[in-house]
Image: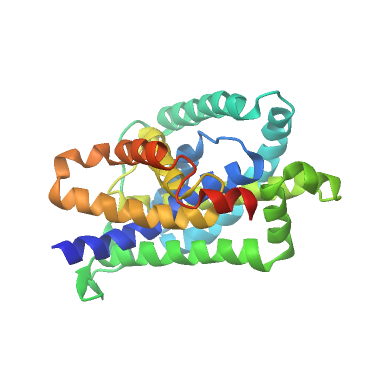
Amino acid sequence: MLTYSITAGLVFGLYFCLVGLGLNLVFGVMRIVNLAHGDFLMLGAFSAFWLYSLLHIHPIATVLIVTVGFIALGIPLYYLLVPRLLKAKDPEMLSIILFFGFSQVIEAITTISFGPSDRSIPGRVLGTAPMHVLGQSLPSAWIVSGAVSAVAVGCLYLYLYRTRLGRLTRAVMVHRDEALATGIDVNRVSAIAFGVGLALAAVGGVFAPFMLGSFGPAMGVDINIQSFAVIVIGSLGSPMGTVLGGLIYGVSEMLMQTYFSSWAGLLPYVLLILILLIRPSGLLGKKVRSA
């Protein structure tokens, strides 16, 4: 049972890496807190549901659709909201207020449009036969979701460390003012990073029905709490820290579900409190600010 829990936890950890990455990328580049992150994930889940239900589009194909669509949505949304925020005396605090309101608007419009009921997509869409990983038999939907999440994380790594735009993005993450002084088009780099952040959330939403069981308009708050737990464990602003945080969170979640299922809902809060008390900068906190 322990081996199964750890193996399944690692698979879920890959998914939680994806869930937290978008939030952390936006914070790392712009130093703003996107409290609507969970709602964009919810919109990704609704996109997958409607595309599958109405047009029979496979969730894997939906990944490409929501990636392009949410990047296209995120770039103009950045220019509409973020530059004004960054001119404020305390952009981080103002961003919390603004994006909290934005989150409530998205949830309200979705509830009015589609109703408050939870929805799901059958797990058999991603395969019916169990798959074997590290000697353990796991549902195909989990393995496929974890594998696609790993690919998405790998693509983000290649974007950040193997492309010119990614290097400019990291330069802005390290010191926004110095990047601006060297002639980097900080707004353009940030707008693309904001779009990529929303796209990562939407891709996480595509697989929410398979990893979380169901989804609904009100799921944004829970996703935000889980995302914050993941990125605080690794370190705010560190994409690589999010990978570590996601794996730790996934294994912890599965162990709690196995041995203390009635207490599993407290896990993100307990992890947040422990990390903030023991290592407030996160496990990779030092590297974030200097690398």
Can you tell which quarter of the image residue 142 is in? bottom left
Q: Is residue 160 left or right of residue 278?
A: right
Q: Is residue 119 left or right of residue 34?
A: left
Residue 143 at what x, y percent from top left? 32, 67
Quarter in which the N terminus is drawn: bottom left
Residue 26 at what x, y percent from top left? 59, 44
Q: Foreground: 114 or 14?
A: 14
Q: Is residue 80 left or right of residue 95?
A: right
Residue 166 at what x, y percent from top left? 68, 60
**Residue 54 seen in the current view:** no
Q: Is residue 148 left or right of residue 180?
A: left
**Residue at horizontal 43 percent and vertical 27 percent from the top:** 112
Quarter in which the C terminus is drawn: bottom right
- From this view, report whether residue 273 is shown above or below residue 159: above
**Residue 89 seen in the current view:** yes
Q: Foreground: 57 or 78?
A: 78
Residue 282 at what x, y percent from top left? 46, 46
